């Protein structure tokens, strides 16, 4: 807003440049006056008979200008006199150390907490549902982490595979009456198949171009779901998706139901707890497979691909196949999560698979620190949990969310866990600091 | 030394590379012999790196043939292969003028990535590896052993677990050579390996390259500006200027060749000394 007042060469550091700061503040106050005189100074209201009346509010106007003046004066004093409030200086160093400790123990602690949640909050249906939601996003985050974090392929259409998984289960159940446990692997395979299908034409693209094509793919899938009404139910979606059974025993209040079979009193919580453990198991499977893959040649090739594609080709790595496997495996986990989503909701429609979902999952991966499993889990917990936590402040939710994102990107530009753990070592495992990774990817 | 030394390993015939109207390489023909160090020299912009990119498949030549003959008798026409097959099947490895390491990965990981194809097969294309199949584990151990061998050879064994990006410039150059060697090449193409090295590092590099060539019977093709490197270690020199070959022969003849001196004069006199 203000005319930038560049301090001509650094003034002597000892003397405080008050005149310059004052000039800055006056300019800012003038601009603020110009802007606010109409926005705040004048108020037009409909009178009792509909006529507009204009009231002036000098008090409000001048207090706003005063706030700008004082604020700018402080900022200018700090900036011009190198009294830098450099958050980066004390935050990353401190947090870097903390994140090392976190890496060691937080994973195990989180894991124990996740296992114990249904027992601790057995009577709290709301928290259990929230737990299921968080775990779904943890799984999606880990799935996308393979594509974005490890292979370095920016995918903005991940929700497409989530949708493929969900619709695979819903449609297979509707047309062929297949059960959840048969459809789950099929949904994963179908999603992987779509991943390969998408992968083929976009393999030569990188960065921004790839992002655009994957974004389009996400929208195409949604459009097909909306418009192919005879098959997918169109915008009305598919109601009555079968609920999961306890390996064949339904969660119903019947003599054949789960409660009766195990001699328990019937309560709907049984199903919720069961769903919780299903998604926990699926998420842990994703995590386990990712950790194993990272130590295999394919995982190392993904990371190498992210670092330097040309060098990969000079070493005889078929980059096409390598990218395709990353896409396919990432998509497969998205498909698993999708079919879980379908069975949990019992109803799916294209409305659930909008771009916002892709953006949210990508934000989780980026905030968590690309390539870090723990970071992604923490980010999913913070974002989805935080979203729910601020639900009562409905209007300010996005504001808080945006501010938190900006704050994290300022203090931890490479995400919560920015370091990298080597996949093999000869003598000693040395954590690779964020600085080197940052340099490597520029 | 193998008995097939001295045979032609690389045969470049009428290689032409045009970029629009610019002819970067003009009907170049030369041969490189097995077990020898062949140097490709010439003033800046003579087309040396373009020749390299054609040989290693990063450019598709406009015209001409590039044939590599292995000891087993197998032959490959490199102008027809995609670059990853040139490294994997025709066994031509290369380094880059501006170092291209995987900077965020450790030196050891860099060398394991170079053994990707072999390890992929051993891991049953991931399917067996994910369950920790014993045959994969032994293949991985062998790969680690090979990596350790080459790290030791280039004097970086102590730095094996450090990220490649944290190594000093000279060490990065050596690591890139080690990485190329881990692909088990028949022909190693080095693009200015001595660029940016100090005199001590340069003489170490000379020793290393001679050692690789003589002991491991890997043929070397190198681009170099440092005349000390070129004259000391090459068996055979090809001189390029404006995309054309102006001289071809052993170092003793090349450095007296009037055409070579003329090409270098006015560009950089010191370099032909």
Image: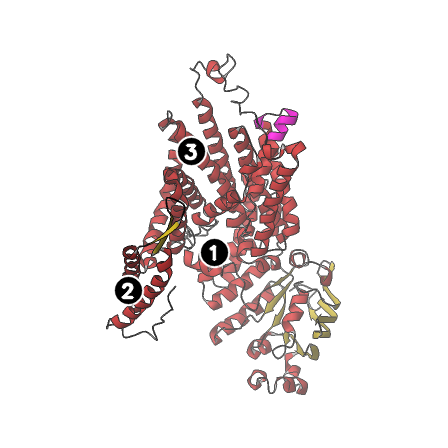
Q: Report the residue that reaches farthest toward the left.
A: A15
User: Which disc number belongs to residue A90?
Assistant: none
Quadrant location of the C terminus of chain B in the rendered image: bottom right
In the image, residue A109 above or below residue B16: above
Mark 3 vs mark 2, foreground winner is 2
- Quick one: label 1, few (<14), some, or many (20+) residues within 10 Å? many
Residue B263 on image: x %, y %: 64, 84
Dot 2: chain letter: A
User: Label 1 belongs to which residue?
Assistant: B106
Residue range highlighted in magenta? A170-181
Q: Vertical placement of A352 versus A151: above or below?
A: above
- Judge if badges 3 and 1 mark residues of a common chain: no
Q: Report how far apart the C-alphas of labels 3 and 1 lie in the structure.
A: 37 Å
Residue in view at x 71 percent, y 74 percent: B21
Helix, strand or loop at disc 2?
Answer: helix
Label for residue A131? 3
Q: Is residue B52 above or below residue A214?
A: below
SS at mark 3?
A: helix
Residue B272 point in image, percent of width and height: 59, 84
Q: Nearer the viewer, residue B272 or A204?
A: A204
Tags 1 and 2 both on a single chain: no
**Which chain letter matches label 3?**
A
Residue B36 seen by the camera: no
Disc 2 target residue: A73
Query: Mark 1 falls on what kind of element?
Result: loop
> Main structural element of the magenta stretch: helix, strand or loop?
helix
Q: Is residue A215 among what the camera can see?
A: yes
Q: Among all residues in the image, which is located at the extreme top? A: A255
- Check if mark 3's residue and mark 2's residue have beta carbons within 8 Å: no
Vertical arrangement, residue A25 with respect to residue A154, above or below: below
């Amino acid at each position: 807003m203000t005319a930038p007042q560049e301090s001509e060469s650094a003034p002597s550091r000892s003397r405080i440049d008050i005149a310059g700061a004052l000039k800055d503040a006056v300019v800012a106050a003038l601009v603020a006056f110009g802007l606010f005189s109409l926005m705040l100074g004048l108020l037009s209201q409909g009178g009792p008979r509909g006529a507009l009346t204009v009231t002036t509010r000098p008090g409000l106007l001048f207090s706003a200008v005063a706030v700008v003046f004082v604020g700018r004066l402080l900022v200018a004093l700090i900036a011009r006199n190198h009294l830098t409030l450099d958050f980066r200086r004390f935050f990353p160093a401190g947090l870097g150390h903390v994140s090392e400790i976190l890496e060691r123990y937080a994973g195990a602690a989180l894991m124990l907490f996740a296992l114990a949640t249904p027992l601790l909050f057995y009577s709290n249906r709301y928290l259990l549902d929230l737990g299921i939601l968080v775990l779904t996003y943890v799984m999606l985050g880990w799935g996308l982490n393979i594509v974005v974090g490890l292979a370095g392929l920016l995918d903005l259409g991940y929700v497409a595979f989530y949708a493929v998984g969900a619709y695979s289960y819903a449609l297979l159940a509707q047309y062929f009456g297949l059960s959840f446990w048969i459809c789950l692997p099929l949904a994963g395979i179908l999603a992987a198949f779509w991943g390969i299908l998408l992968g083929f034409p976009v393999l030569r693209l990188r960065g921004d171009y790839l992002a655009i094509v994957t974004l389009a793919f996400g929208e195409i899938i949604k459009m097909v779901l909306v418009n192919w009404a005879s098959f997918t139910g169109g915008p009305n979606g598919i109601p009555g998706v079968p609920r999961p059974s306890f390996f064949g025993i339904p969660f119903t209040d019947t003599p054949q139901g789960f409660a009766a079979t195990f001699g328990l009193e019937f309560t709907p919580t049984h199903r919720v707890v069961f769903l919780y453990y299903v998604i926990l198991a699926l998420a842990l499977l994703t995590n386990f497979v990712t950790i194993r893959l990272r130590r295999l040649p394919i995982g190392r090739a993904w990371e190498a691909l992210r670092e330097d594609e040309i060098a990969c080709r000079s070493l005889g790595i078929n980059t096409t196949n390598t990218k395709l496997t990353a896409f396919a495996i990432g998509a497969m986990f998205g498909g698993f999560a999708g079919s879980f989503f379908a069975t949990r909701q019992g109803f799916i429609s294209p409305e659930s698979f909008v771009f916002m979902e892709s953006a949210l999952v990508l934000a989780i991966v980026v905030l968590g620190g690309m390539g870090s499993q723990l970071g992604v889990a923490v980010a999913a917990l913070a974002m989805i949990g935080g979203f729910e936590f601020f639900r009562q402040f409905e209007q300010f939710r996005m504001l808080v969310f945006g501010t938190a994102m900006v704050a994290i990107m300022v203090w931890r530009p490479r995400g919560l866990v920015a370091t990298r753990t080597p996949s093999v070592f000869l003598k000693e495992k040395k954590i690779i600091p964020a600085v080197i990774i940052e340099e490597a990817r520029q | 030394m193998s008995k097939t030394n001295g045979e032609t390993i690389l045969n470049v015939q009428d290689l032409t590379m045009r970029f629009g109207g610019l002819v970067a390489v003009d009907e170049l023909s030369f041969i490189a012999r097995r077990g020898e160090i062949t140097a490709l020299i010439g003033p800046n912009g003579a087309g040396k790196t373009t020749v390299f990119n054609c040989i290693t498949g990063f450019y598709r030549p406009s015209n001409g043939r590039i044939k590599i003959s292995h000891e087993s008798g197998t032959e490959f026409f490199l102008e027809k292969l995609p670059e990853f097959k040139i490294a994997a099947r025709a066994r031509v490895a290369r380094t880059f003028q501006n170092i291209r390491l995987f900077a965020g990965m450790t030196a050891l990981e860099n060398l394991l990535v170079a053994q990707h194809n072999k390890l992929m097969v051993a891991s049953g294309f991931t399917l067996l590896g994910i369950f920790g199949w014993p045959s994969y584990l032994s293949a991985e151990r062998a790969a680690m052993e090979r990596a350790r061998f080459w790290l030791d050879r280039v004097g970086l064994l102590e730095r094996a677990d450090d990220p490649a990006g944290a190594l000093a410039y000279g060490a990065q150059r050596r690591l890139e050579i080690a990485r190329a060697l881990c692909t088990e090449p028949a022909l190693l193409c080095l693009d200015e390996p001595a660029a940016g090295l100090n005199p001590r590092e340069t003489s170490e590099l000379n020793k290393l390259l001679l050692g690789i060539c003589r002991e491991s019977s890997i043929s070397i093709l190198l681009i170099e500006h440092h005349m000390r490197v070129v004259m000391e270690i090459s068996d055979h020199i090809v001189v390029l200027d404006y995309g054309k070959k102006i001289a071809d022969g052993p170092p003793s003849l090349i450095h007296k060749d009037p055409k070579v001196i003329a090409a270098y004069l006015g560009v950089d006199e010191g370099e032909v000394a």
